[in-house]
Amino acid sequence: MISKIVNDVQSAVAGIKDGSTVLLGGFGGAGQAHELLDALIEQGAKDLTIVSNNAGSGKTGIAALLAAGSVRKVICSFPRQADSYVFDELYRSGKVELELVPQGTLAERIRAGGAGIGGFFTKTAVGTQLAEGKEIRTIDGEDYVLEGPIKADVALIKAYKADRWGNLVYRKTARNFGPIMATAAKLTIVQVDEIVELGDLDPEAIVTPSLYVQRVVRVAKKA
Amino acid sequence: MKRISRDQIAERLARDIPEGAVVNLGIGLPTKVANYLPADKDIFLQSENGVLGMGPAPAPGEEDYDLINAGKQPVTLLKGGSFFHHADSFAMMRGGHLDICVLGAFQVSRWGDLANWSTGEPGAIPAVGGAMDLAAGAKDVFIMMELQTKEGESKLVDKCTYPLTGLKCVSRVYTDVAVFQIEPGGVVRVVDDVSGAGQEELKRITGLELVF
């Protein structure tokens, strides 16, 4: 009998190696795998490249991972937030590298990584600094820039419900990067609010089919 | 000349959004437009973080932080609304499925070039978010901004000096002084002199050959 359910967040993040590329789900706090991030800090993997929409705010979540000195490089679209002081300080002092990517290009690069696509041409960022040094091709009279896939060693995402095979459904806008990140990592680790019996998720409504998921852990929702 | 307020700019812009339009409102000033959309018309608000059919802010105490807008503020979902993942959300933009997006700007050129993501200052933390995708993909890009900087320089310019967000992407510019239409060949038409500034004053402020 296959069960991808693990008992606790420590087991969920076990074995993540130094130097890994890690996809971190979430848009701001929505969909962020907060408890898995805390477990990753404790687990201690260093020299990480993280891929995420934001670069953390306040002192918790991604900001805590950055503050722990675990991160070498951040690939993201919107690092600057009102209280993103942990990232700001590390970036200004040259302690963390930033690759800034337009949000849709970031999403599509992750999708491409999971879908076996070696690259794609997008019109986003043509004529801007973020397309400098990249191949431009004119297709049907319009200019496009070549972008490559993002593949990762690990994804840490949050979903609403899972079964023991790893089928997932999400909750509202907390879905965001979860479904595409699940496809692009060798080891996709999911924290969920609820684990349900096999067959309880409506097959028509499953967003992430089980084969993309390796580990599932239930984290009790805070009241 | 009587400049209009930010809320009045939002109200003026909202009047140009037709029923049935799919609209993305950028973070900051553009979110005000939502307050002036007519309640008797179906207008579909899309947000980059995976929602179509976004409704107004929830009542106090009803906030659900799994249901937020691009500015990460709690919102609601209208009947008929839907959720989708990020790659789908941006496919909607780049694929030309959005009728209108409303963005703020540092500068807009008479050619329709947009600069709104970076002032290029040393030490500034760069952040782009979805602005470049929206600029490249929406059928119409409406800009909402004050016409001048605090120092009195026009933000509607011959050529942008700040780093660009997109080339030839802006169709309309809604300001506290006038509404401008960007037309092919670098032509800027004044479609509504909302402040009553008059032709000569508008030309003086912008330093551009305007068409009325």
Image (cartoon, coloured by chain):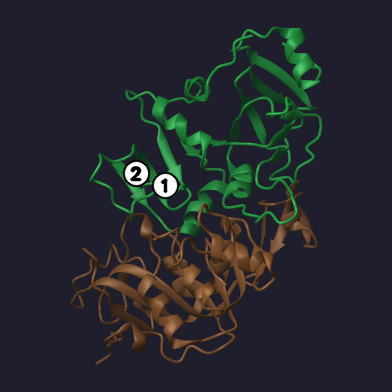
Chain colours: A brown, B green
How far apart are the two marked residues, 2 and 1, measured between alpha carbons?
Answer: 6 Å
Which numbered disc covers residue B69? Answer: 1
Q: Earlier in the sequence, mark 2 or mark 1?
A: 1
| Residue A199 image point, x, y percent | 20, 74
Q: Quadrant of residue B19?
A: top left
Left or right: where B156 falls relative to B130: right
Which numbered disc covers residue A222? Answer: none
**Residue that label 2 marks:** B75
Q: Secondary structure at mark 1?
A: loop
> Residue, x 63% and y 48% (percent of image)?
B132
CB under 8 Å between discs 2 and 1: yes
> Residue, x 44% and y 73% (percent of image)?
A182
Compared to residue A79, the image places residue B81 above or below, namely above
Work out whether residue A171 or residue B9 is closer to the camera in this orientation and state it.
B9
Work out whether residue A171 or residue A122 is closer to the camera in this orientation and state it.
A171
Residue type pointed to by label 2:
Val
Q: Quadrant of residue A223?
A: bottom left
> Residue, x 63% and y 60% (percent of image)?
A101
Tell me, yes or no, if residue B146 can be seen here: yes
Left or right: where A154 falls relative to B208: left
| Residue B17 image point, x, y percent | 48, 26
| Residue A60 image point, x, y percent | 43, 68
Q: Chain of mark 2?
A: B
